[in-house]
Amino acid sequence: MDENNRYSDEDRVYRTRSSSQRSQGAARTRSSRSASQRSRSQASYDGEVRRRSSQQRSSQQRSSQQRSSQQRTRRLEPVEPAQTSASSGISGIIERVTSDKRILIAAIAAVVIIIVLIVALVSCHSNNSSTDTEDATQDQEQTQEQTDTSAEQTGEATAATGTDGAGNPLASDVVQEASGALARHRSAEERMATSTSDNETKPTEHVVYLTFDDSPSDLTPQFLDILDQYGVNGTWFVVGCTDNLDYINDIWDRGNQIAIHTQTHDFDVIYQNSDAFWNDSATICEAVNERLGFTPTLMRFPGGSANDYNRSWCKTLQAEAEARGWHYFDWNVGSGDATWPLLTADEIVNNITTESADNNSCCVLMHDSDSKTTTLEALPRIIEYYISEGYVFDVLTADSFGYHF
Ligand SMILES: [Zn+2]
């Protein structure tokens, strides 16, 4: 503002001087004074210009100094912040990179661990699968063993393989019993079947026929139970002189064979003559027919087809039997249990095993009467003997070999 005021004053000075020039008569003192004033004003103006220039220079110098100072200050200022900033960026990057590397390494490690775990799990699963397979096999074996045990307890059988005494395959209807017995189970039709066989064809099969004369008796159910326990069947030659005729049904229904052994089993009666024999036999045939609905065609002469009571005319009786359609059976293995006093079970077993030793097929004579307790006692060992020798247990049929004396 001061400088503006001075410029205004300067303008007034110029205007005053122009006025003085137009008045030609102005005093020279005034002119001189005016010149002096102009000189002072010019000096003042020049001084002002110089001062302003000086101020400008000072200002410029101050600015320069300030810039220099700032530059110095900048130079003197620690560079760490900038460097730190840059360093911080680099280190940040490094840190991030490092951090990223760590993350990457951690990720790789995690992946490796996962892969290892997966491989371990797969391997474990594979091992478990193998173990499972092995376990399943063991389970199957155990199940089979349990089935076998169960079959043994229930008397069930499985298909059997083997050969007969001549090396020929066994018939397909032979089964391996849980007891170890090879057994053929005949249907009712097979057991009832009639035939024109002369019963002279000797079996090649390693077969045993367990036969029980003078039956049924009080012991019949126990004999039947033992046979069932081993899963085998036998042939019962029944008589009518018993209070246990109804056991005939049990014998038959449990897969055994029924044959005739006369009604009275009284040697003095039946071997009087042919008529006496056949009339006596007719009675038991009727008794069996009443119970089973058919008349058997298998029979056994009491004491055998040739005994002390019929020795003189046995051939006639045998011929008559065949003419009447009978298939009569003797035996090739005797237990000796018909004697009195009773043989011990050991003696019975010994007799049977001794007589069986040389026979490929055995028709074994035993008795199922009320007194034959030692026969009953010996029966399990007799069956086990034939099992151990690989015999096939079968029942006699109309086509069987007669084992005639
Ligand atoms: Zn008898």
Image (tube, helix red, strand yellow):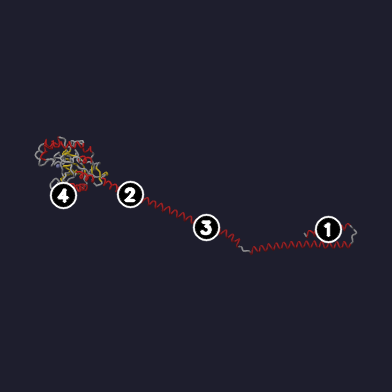
> Real-space Cα distance between discs 1 and 2?
133 Å
Q: Indicate which disc residue 12 carries.
A: 1
Local packing at callout 3 (Cα closer than 10 Å; few below 14, some 14-19, many 20+) is: few
- Left or right of 91 in this view: 363: left
- Ligand 1 shows up in the quarter that is top left
Q: Earlier in the sequence, mark 2 or mark 3?
A: 3
Q: Indicate which disc residue 344 carries.
A: 4
The residue sitting at 84% across, 62% down in the picture is 37
> Real-space Cα distance between discs 3 and 4?
99 Å
Q: Indicate which disc residue 99 carries.
A: 3
- Left or right of 311 in this view: 173: right
The answer to whether mark 3 and mark 1 are in CB contact below 8 A is no
> Real-space Cα distance between discs 2 and 3?
56 Å
The answer to whether mark 1 and mark 4 are in CB contact below 8 A is no
User: In terms of secondary structure, where does tag 2 sit?
Assistant: helix
Q: Nearer the viewer, residue 118 or 179?
A: 179
User: In terms of secondary structure, where does tag 4 sit?
Assistant: loop
Label 2 lies in ligand 1 vicinity (Cβ under 8 Å): no
Label 3 lies in ligand 1 vicinity (Cβ under 8 Å): no
Q: Nearer the viewer, residue 275 or 352?
A: 275
Q: Indicate which disc residue 139 carries.
A: 2
Q: Nearer the viewer, residue 159 or 283?
A: 283
Q: Earlier in the sequence, mark 3 or mark 4?
A: 3
